Every structure is written in C-alpha cells, then in structure tokens.
Image (spheres, rainbow, N blue to C red):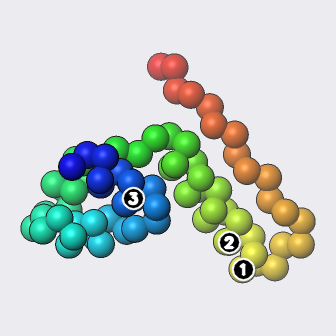
Amino acid sequence: MLKFVTLLIKSGRSLCEVQKLLGHTQVKTTQRYAHLAPEALLDASNAATRAVGSMLGLTEPLTDVPLVENKG
C-alpha cells in the first residue's frame, strides 16, 4: 500500500482524495503511508512560490530554491 499511496501523492492527488480512495476514516492513517521525498516537498514549495509571483505580476522568473540536506 505504501508505494500506491506515494505514487498517488507524487502524481498530484490530494491527501483527501487518497484518503477517500483507501477508505481511511482519519487523515492521520493516510499520512502514515504518504512518504514524500524531500525533493517532492521542495518542488511543491517552488511551485507555490512561482504561483504567488505570477499572481503578483512579477515579470522576472523566480529561481527555484536548491535542496539542502539537513545534516543535524
């Protein structure tokens, strides 16, 4: 089930959609199976930054933030 959930989340399905597909009554159960790589979270953050920049009418493209591993 772990790979199924991760693939759905990585393909853009929301946690709520995955929860309903799996029949989980609590989102915490779905979250337990939704392991996301740091790169996926960074990509989501960068997408949000670009969307906000677009809404603000910024003409220069925003630079994506590079991934920095937490060594601590």
| Nearer mark to the viewer, of 1 and 3 | 3
Residue 8, percent from left and from top: 37, 60
Q: Residues within 10 Å of mark 3 (few under 14, many from 20)?
A: some
Q: Amino acid at mark 1?
A: Met
Marks 1/3: CA–CA distance:
25 Å
Instruction: Please name the residue that numbered disc 1 is placed on.
Output: 55
Q: Amino acid at mark 2?
A: Val
Does residue 47 lie above or below 41 as drawn?
A: below
Marks 3/2: CA–CA distance:
22 Å
Tell me the tag on residue 52: 2
The numbered mark, 1 or 3, whose residue comes first in the sequence reads: 3
Residue 34 seen in this snapshot: no
Most distant residue in the right direction: 60
The numbered mark, 3 or 2, whose residue comes first in the sequence reads: 3
Q: Residues within 10 Å of mark 1 (few under 14, many from 20)?
A: few
Instruction: Please name the residue that numbered disc 3 is placed on.
Output: 9
Does residue 57 lie above or below 21 as drawn?
A: below
Q: Residue at x 89, y 72 (%)?
A: 59
Specify whether 54 is left or right of 21: right
| Nearer mark to the viewer, of 3 and 2 | 3
Residue 27 seen in this snapshot: yes
Marks 1/2 in contact by CB < 8 Å: the verdict is yes
- Residue 62 sits in which quadrant? bottom right
Element carrying mark 3: helix
Q: Amino acid at mark 3?
A: Ile
